[in-house]
Amino acid sequence: MTRLHPRYRSTPTESHRIGKVSSVESERLTIELDSSTTGLVKAGSSGIVPVGTINSYVTVPAGPHRIVAVITAIQISEQRSGETGSLDDELKGTRQVQAVMVGRIEGGTFVSGITTYPSLFSPVSSATPREIARIFASPAGPALVLGEAVVAPDQNVTLQANIFLSRHSAIVGSTGSGKTCSVVAALDGLLALDVPYANIMVFDSNGEYASAFAPDTDRGRRANAMVIGPEPGPQTGLFLPHWFMDNDDHLAFLRASEGAQAPLLQRAVADARLGSQLDRGLLTQLRNVARSLGDIRDLSNAKTKKPQEILRGSLASLASGLSALAIEAGTSGADDAAQLWTDLSESAARWEDLELLQGNAAWDMPVSLDQRNKLEAMLEAMTSRIAKEFNALGLGSADVVSDFDAPRYYSLEALDEVFLPDRIEREANSEPRIRAYAATMLMRLSRLLADKRYNFMTRVPPFPDALARFLRLMLGRDPLHGSEPGGDEPPWAEAYRTRAGTSVNHSVTIIDLSLIASDVLENVTALLGRLLLGFAQRVEPRGSFPMLLVLEEAHRYIPAVPSDQSTRSSIAFERIAKEGRKFGVSLMVASQRPSELSRTVMSQCGSLIAHRVVNPDDQELIRHATPFASRDLLKQLAGLATQHAIVLGEATPVPVYVRIRDVANAPRGSDPKFIEAWGTPPIDDDLLIDTTARAWEQSTS
């Protein structure tokens, strides 16, 4: 018999013995129960001891340690008592228990992982109360309480908070299984650690969390939560300035194709950023003059019955453009604008001889050589001067822009009316078909500007320190930064003053996205995720400003198979899953369809809280995202009760079947009470329908 190490003088007594090891296979044990153990419990000196209860714990000596295993199955192995092999031989059953080894008790402390394996016939005991207490002992450092162990109701299930946050986490479960309440329970556990400067952002796609963090609740007061949305506008604070988008964001937002549209859009946005401080009217008139010059140049190759008439019309158009440019130059009052008009007018003066020539020429006379020479001289001089002006403004074709992605303000209307058409015209000089290639992109941009549902992105007015104030709003710091009402404020100032209360900081930001148009939802979430990661990457020292991003219904943002609309959000959050840990950005993904979640993100989640999952595809994905030693535990996913879950991963020392603790003011996601609603007299149903429909028609809700 193996002699135990002296430190284990308090090992289980014979009253806790339930059987012996009959098989050791990798992380699995097969335990043959003693014949004297006839029921599911046995009485001992320390009370009633469970025998073969699923999810209960057993211990086995292995050298100086005691191995801890979780029971995952119980079965009867049939054996024949006779020796003849006839059908009349008596059948006897040996009860066997399957268990998964999860750790060891070493030096009086439970430690995850296996270093030595038990030998065959080693005695197996049900874990004693002292051993159970060691298994569920609160980890070193800050820990959050998630619930209580089902097999040991007197033991809290705690998670090591720093590991839980730094390794990412996933909370999965079918509708009605308690998934959303688990998210709130985890957040409650974090907020209970006295973290007034926490940076928690909840991406709420169903509008469930505002009620859970209402100002009159303990949770809302503790977090001083800030709710943004759901209806875009000053009253809710839901604004996301379009100029925060980078190059790839713009391509996704306008669905620009890679062929001709993408290069046009990239350079046009760069032009708009550089030209945002310039006089828009002056730029428009300058572009009109350039277009007139292009029309005159095309006249050389035009085949028409009335070339002189067309020439006269083109020159008249140029004269009109120069007159409008002169007005804009005078209005701007800028010396360089006045000089530009003077230079162009001097070049255009060369057409005086042309006017004499064409005045004496019949409309059907071809353009003469003398006319062509004078036209070319004028066009060359004016085109060169306009190109010089565009280059001086940073809008020239050959100019190099320092950073196409810098979040510098520009007008999306100016992009639509000036900068993008200008780039199209420039390229069309060498490739006329470019206009047709860019038509769909221009059409989408015009539609976005015309639809007020997108105003929270497309028509945000410029304001000082825009990016800093936006990040302060997201990260719970005063986004008004000492500004006074009526001054040059961000568009969410009204909502912030209304909701933030007397305290400046808030620990939790609820971003209610439930009313965002579906075709831009992924653009919004991708941009938010990229901005937050980009900020964290630039903070020094690295990781000194940690944040938690909670993605409710995460399969909408990071699907397993991204669509054209969700590609940007998938890229953004997959990058956070892979790189965020280094910079202090943590993900908590919650989904009722884990099989539709990105495999990349799921594989990076170090902690898993799995509620009831019925769909076989969902179960299979969870098993593949789980260490081998814990996969047997997940076979019970389909039968888990509401508010019960299996918790496993790096933040908990042992896989555990847990009842999630009750949460007050749970998110608004309970099932509708159909029968009660159908069984009571209607109350103003007609008025309700009319009011809702009218508000919908007017886009007020």
Image: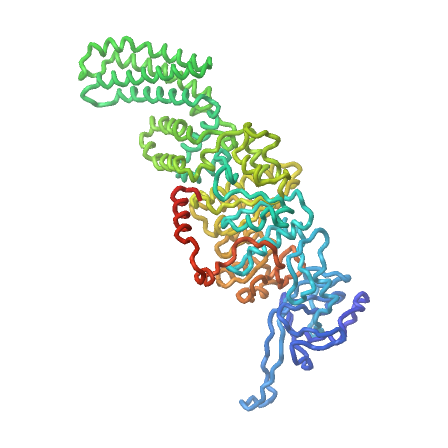
Q: Tell me the residue at 82%/67% (across/down).
A: 6
Residue 636: % across, % down: 56, 66
Q: Quadrant of the N terminus?
A: bottom right
Q: Tell me the residue at 70%/51% (across/down).
A: 142
* Residue 124 relative to residue 451: left or right: right
Q: Quadrant of the C terminus?
A: top left
Q: Nearer the viewer, residue 149 or 84?
A: 149
Q: Nearer the viewer, residue 578 or 174?
A: 174
Asked if 344 appears above or below 683 in the picture, the reply is: above
Residue 554: % across, % down: 51, 51
Residue 38: % across, % down: 66, 81
Asked if 135 appears above or below 509 in the picture, the reply is: below
* Residue 685 relative to residue 314: left or right: right
Asked if 263 appears above or below 618 in the picture, the reply is: above
Q: Is residue 533 visible?
A: no
Residue 583: which quarter of the image? top right
Q: Tell me the residue at 38%/37% (across/down).
A: 447
